[in-house]
Amino acid sequence: MSYEDQNQPYSNDPYNYQDSSQYDTSQQPQDQGYGPQDNYQGQGYDNSQYQAPQPSEQRPSQNLQQLQRIQSGIPGFDQIVGGGLIRDRVYLLAGPAGAGKTIFSSEFIWNGLTKFNENGVYVVLEETPQQLRENLFNSFNWNIANYEDSGNLIILDAISSRLGLASQERFVVPRPFTLEALLYEIQTAIQACQARRVVIDSLDAMSLELTQVDLRSLIQRLTMILKSFGCTTLLVSGQADNTNQGRKAVEEYVVDGMIRLHHTLEESVSGETTLEQNALQGNSLEEDSFAMKMRSRKIEIPKMRGTSHSHYLHPFTIGEQGIEVKSEPEVTKRLRRAIFKAKQVD
């Protein structure tokens, strides 16, 4: 590279520009703007039909619809999820054995049939349809067989083919058991009874021997099928242990919301407090207490897209009418204070 002035020291500074007065600007365009008034003279462009875009505040906004909620019918539950579950969504119902997952999901279906005129599909993968019928009838007097006969409810037998057994059920997944066959039969059952509520019990049986990638694909495909028919769905799953956190993470990320049930062993303290009156030493409180170990059930909502929800643990009970959730948060400690005056001694 040559320089006209060899006496000036060389500089490798990219910002060491020459004085602008030394440049010939006679051949430079006078207006480099790109606004709507520019004619791009000499460039072959014709912008005579150009229209400036509307300001953002004048552009038509997208029509956003209010999310529609459905009532679960489970006392106290709808209050802690902002007024009910959102229609056309898929929720994960997780918890350990004995927490009440099957009762919760069955009550969700039962209330849809008896209170809200919504048909349902219940997919069983871990107990037979007859066991489900007998357990619900003997525990809560819920005769779901009547709704099967009327065509309002379909119990899809998926456990028989999964175990390689014969089945006398009207709706059954054919042998050999495959995930493709299961998805097809679920879709057929939903169409047959025009279901609005679906329960799949349980996801653990569906996902046996699946990798994380396959499981995520399975849940995504299942979610798309269920949403396309306008179904609100509960996917039942056992609580993952510490050695299976990867599979648990897949489930939680794919679904629209998560309902977790707890079934823990806790210490319950009972007893009585008496007031002893002593004329010489004054009044005193004496407490006789004893502790017992007992199972306690609680529910929490770790995730719920599109709605506000409680972030507390809520106790719930299982009675003759099913599950009842205490909408008030659990109180773990309570301070008791007694104030009394000492008896005056003459």
Image (tube, rainbow, N blue to C red):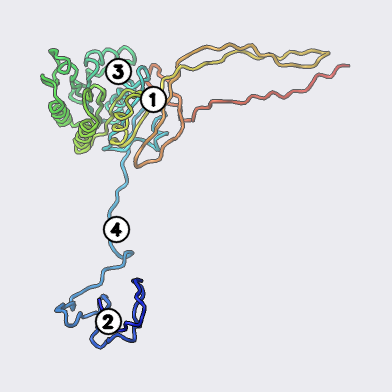
Residue 272: quadrant of the picture? top right
Residue 242 - label: none
Which residue was labeled with disc 4? 61
> Which amino acid, mark 3?
Trp
In this rendering, is residue 46 above or below 222?
A: below
Residue 142 - label: 3
Judge depth for marks 4 and 1 and give the one in front.
1
Residue found at the far right of this picture: 346
> Which amino acid, mark 4?
Ser
Circles 4, 3 touching at the beta carbon (< 8 Å): no
Judge depth for marks 3 and 1 and give the one in front.
1
Label 4 and label 2: CA atoms lie apart by 36 Å
Does label 3 or label 1 sit earlier along the sequence?
3
Q: Residues within 10 Å of mark 1 (few under 14, many from 20)?
A: many
Label 1 and label 2: CA atoms lie apart by 69 Å
Q: Residues within 10 Å of mark 2 (few under 14, many from 20)?
A: few
Which residue was labeled with disc 2? 31
Q: Position of residue 13 (x, y in %)?
A: 36, 71
Residue found at the far front of this picture: 7
Q: Residue at x 53, y 25 (%)?
A: 332
Circles 4, 1 touching at the beta carbon (< 8 Å): no
Judge depth for marks 2 and 3 and give the one in front.
2
Label 2 and label 3: CA atoms lie apart by 82 Å
In this rendering, is residue 248 above or below 287?
A: below
Which residue was labeled with disc 1? 261
